[in-house]
Image (cartoon, rainbow, N blue to C red):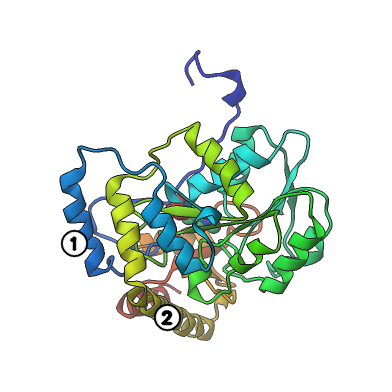
Amino acid sequence: MSRFLSRRYENLVPYVPGEQPQDGAFIKLNTNESPYPPSPLVLERVRDEAASLRLYPDPDARRLRAKLAAHLGVLPENVLVTNGSDEALAFAFLAFFDRDTPVRFPDITYGFYPVYCNLCGVRADIVPLREDFTVCVDDYVAVGRPVVLANPNAPTGLFLPVSDIERIAASNPDHIVLIDEAYIDFGGESAVPLINKYDNLLIVGTFSKSRSLAGARIGYAAACAPLIQDLDTIRNSFNPYNLSRTALAAGEAALDEQAYYTKNCREIARVRDETAEKLRDLGFIVTDSRANFLFIRHPERSGHDLYAELRARGILVRWFNLPRISDYLRVTVGTAEQMDIFVDTIRAII
Ligand code: PMP
């Protein structure tokens, strides 16, 4: 820390993303990327768009917002696009959460929520998940404070039905209920249709996982128009050109080839469930994931040992050195071939 860092940030502990080795030597199952490349039209449009990089992008991302709104079944005024969904989350914390009112979220969830609390000077009101990592919905009903939930949750993969999200939104009418749907396309049901009914409901999503565009950094928020306007005020007070021309082109093209991604998501869900069965047969405890990853524990092996042994054999998975989950591994679902290698390797290890 330099002597110039603002005292506001002296206790800031930043988020640590998963390892991104640059040599391609690993089977990479550690950051929930898609194992499939972007669709052909994305590659073509990004290449074409490169010729226009001299010019700033459309600061209002009008074409991408219109296509995304149509895909989500809402109006363009109900969506905002951001530099990854992390940016949508950051804008939401800045716009809607105050020092005086703590924000409620589970103890085991996306590790960025406490970091944004810290960055924005907002207190976190952390509630433990049940022993089996399910969310106790009543912990979030009529709590009189903002709520943040990832659905499906990360890193557990467990999913709450939309009826539960509706109960939470309806019972906290004076506070934002933020639902992070980063993993919604792998078998969950989106709560986006509810934004027309609840003016406190804010949904965040991403093109990083189901649309194979983690490297393009495209996320979004969906909510009633006044909430989107507030987020846009923050965006325009921070970085009006928050998506590059090539990112906008990639996002638009991805929405033009939705069928390709729907097919990939179905295959990822199929491989996920098949891999889960094989791991259960090997004695692993496996949560019922609806995401593009599995959350697994072996009763006799420590999480860190398994992580290290997999790494030594060329397979990267995510291990969290955190209370309650330090014996778990989060394993991104790769192709069927990659998961066969993963299962064979872990069988050999145990
Ligand atoms: N939310 C959750 C629950 C995530 O796991 C991630 C991925 N790290 C994100 C949001 C952010 O993804 P991105 O910024 O790539 O859209």
Residue at 33%, 60% (x, y): give it. 252
| Image spot of residue 96 (x, y percent) | 66, 41
Q: Nearer the viewer, residue 14 or 36?
A: 36
Pointer 1 residue Cβ closer than 8 Å to ligand 1: no
Looking at the picture, which amino acid does disc 2 mark? Arg
Q: Is residue 199 above or below residue 348?
A: above
The answer to whether 81 is drawn above or below residue 240 in the figure is below
Horizontal and vertical percent position of residue 296:
54, 70
User: What is the x, y in percent for residue 61?
Assistant: 39, 49
Secondary structure found at label 1: helix
Tell me, for residue 315, which label it has, or none. none
Name the kind of residue labelled 1 in the image. Answer: Glu
Element type at mark 2: helix
**Distance CA(mark 1)–CA(mark 2):** 25 Å
Question: Within 8 Å of ligand 1, the CB of disc 2?
Answer: no
- Label 1 environment density (alpha carbons within 10 Å; few <14, some 14–19, many ≥20): few
Residue 265 in percent (x, y) is at: 41, 75
* The quadrant where residue 136 appears: bottom right
Instruction: Name the residue: 30% across, 63% down.
Output: 253
> Can the viewer see residue 36 in this picture?
yes
Above-or-below relation of 277 to 135? below
Q: Residue at (24%, 58%) from the top-left corner? A: 24
- Horizontally, residue 213 falls left or right of residue 121, namely left
Mark 2 neighbour class, 10 Å CA radius: few under 14, some 14 to 19, many 20 or more: some
Vertical arrangement, residue 144 with respect to residue 56, above or below:
below
Give the residue at mark 1. Answer: 44
Q: Which residue lies under the disc numbered 2?
A: 266
Please tell me which residue lies in front, 164 or 108: 164
